[in-house]
Amino acid sequence: LNASFVMEGGAVVGNEIRGGGSDAVGGGGVYAIDDARFEMKKGAVVRGNKAPSAGGGVFVSGGASFSMEGGSVEGNELGRFSAGEALFIGEEATKDVDIKGGLLSSDKGSTVCVRSSSVSFKLSGGILTSGFVAILSYADVADKVAVGGTGMLFSQGADVVYEGKSISVPDPS
């Protein structure tokens, strides 16, 4: 399909995926698959959306890509035993994800979940906050998660968790 969605300003607010079939698992706010490209820029808001299992705010998989230079993904919700309240990067995502600006935030679950072993997730700018686990990754992708540059990570729980093992991001001072 090669669809493209560049969001500069505006809001995706208050959407909910109901049901539970395999096609209705995630992406309460934005669901990007099949080589789609989703870009968030200054003023863009994805908030107050709900999904049953993955990507309460944004779900990216199936060859799709996501980039963030500004805006916010916050206040989204997931069902029980779920991952990626703000952002879920599925197993078939194809482009590296670099958060260069903006805010990714969650209160209860993991803020970001990285399932793809073919991409890396980098917080080089912007802010990632979490009330529980900031970044949930899996053993086969543990070396593909990085926080650096001017990126800031704040977590009331674990910073980064790989298959149940908690790893804290070093203090820059």
Image: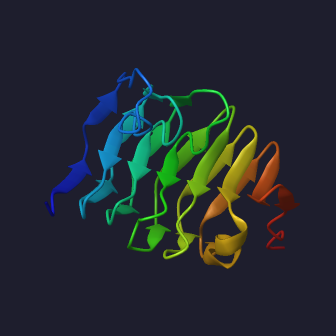
Residue 115: x and y, percent? 57, 61
The one of 24 and 56 positioned closer to us in this rendering: 24
Image vertical order of residue 160 relative to residue 11, above or below = below
Image vertical order of residue 159 relative to residue 132, above or below = below
Would residue 41 be visible to someone looking at this image? yes
Residue 34: x and y, percent? 25, 59
Which residue sits at x=77%, y=56%? 159
Which residue sits at x=62%, y=76%? 144
Residue sitting farthest toward the front: 21
| The N terminus, quarter of image | bottom left
Which residue sits at x=86%, y=60%? 165
| The C terminus, quarter of image | bottom right
Residue 123: x and y, percent? 57, 67
Image vertical order of residue 27 relative to residue 120, above or below = above
The one of 104 and 165 positioned closer to us in this rendering: 165
Which residue sits at x=54%, y=35%? 53
